Image (tube, rainbow, N blue to C red):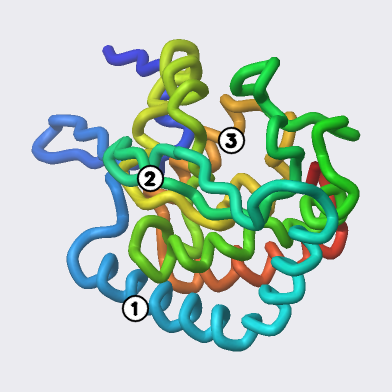
Amino acid sequence: KVFPDLFQIIASEVSIDDVNGLPLLTVRDVALRGWRRTLKRAMDLIVSAMGLVLFSPFLILIAVLVKLDSPGPVFYAQERMGLDARPFPVLKFRSMRADAEEHTGPIWATKDDPRRTRLGAFLRRFSLDELPNLINVLFGQMSLVGPRPERPVFVEQFKQIVPRYMDRHKEKAGMTGWAQVNGLRGDTSIIERTKYDLWYIENWSLLLDIKILLLTFLRILRAENAY
């Protein structure tokens, strides 16, 4: 008899087959293989390129406002962990003071975070600070949809306490993800986020990506847990 840990299979589609009386337990593996990965990359290239062109006037406006709002650079490059746990610089519009972590070190953003600039509070509320992520997508460092990337210092913490946490890195990090459109962003459960991320990796489809992108726009308008 086999008693698998519930969390180990909670994100997977499990089926039981019978071959001449021998029970076989099937657990879904990573869905993005072969041509599916090529298809996803093609969508990333097309959408990110079109987005950067169409939004370019808006991006320039935000860049000017960031520069006028507070001293410091327009963009903020922060190291995150992506595919195969390789670090890469995530590009964002700077939404906090230039010295935001000088005295605290790496910490998560909180609601009404005092480190935010005046413009930064607005940008973060509607996730506009993350629009430069489109550059990461265009260069292949990220995907439009996937598990949200975390900073290396937090990855080291989470992998010690969350089973299968590192399995999130079997696919590229995303600008948005299945966990985020289900309300798991900001200060929410890492365990729950991991479950949703693993379910996405094991059940990927192009239609699912499109659904997540559409739901993301609705979530942005509601600005839930965005700070």
Q: CA distance from mark 3 to mark 2?
A: 21 Å
Residue type of the residue flagged with mark 3 = Arg
Residue type of the residue flagged with mark 2 = Phe
Contact, mark 3 vs mark 2 (Cβ under 8 Å): no
Q: Residue at x 31, y 75 (%)?
A: 39
Residue type of the residue flagged with mark 1 = Ala
Label whose residue precedes the other's in the sequence (1 or 2): 1
Residue 40 sits in quarter: bottom left
Mark 2 Cα shell of 10 Å, populated few (<14), some (14-19), many (≥20): some
Closer to viewer: mark 1 or mark 2 = 2
Mark 1 Cα shell of 10 Å, populated few (<14), some (14-19), many (≥20): few
Circle 1: element type: helix
Instruction: Say if 155 sits above or below 207 in the image.
Output: above
User: In this image, 115 relative to 156: left or right?
Assistant: right
Residue denoted by label 2:
88
Q: Residue at x 60, y 22 (%)?
A: 106
Q: Position of residue 94 (x, y in %)?
A: 68, 50
Residue 29 visible in the current orientation:
yes
Instruction: Say if 122 sits above or below 65 in the image.
Output: above
Instruction: Say if 173 sits above or below 47 in the image.
Output: above
Label whose residue precedes the other's in the sequence (1 or 3): 1
Q: Position of residue 144 (x, y in %)?
A: 49, 64
Q: Position of residue 149 (x, y in %)?
A: 49, 42
Q: CA distance from mark 1 to mark 3?
A: 27 Å
Circle 3: element type: helix
Mark 3 Cα shell of 10 Å, populated few (<14), some (14-19), many (≥20): many
Labelled disc at residue 42 = 1
Residue denoted by label 3:
193
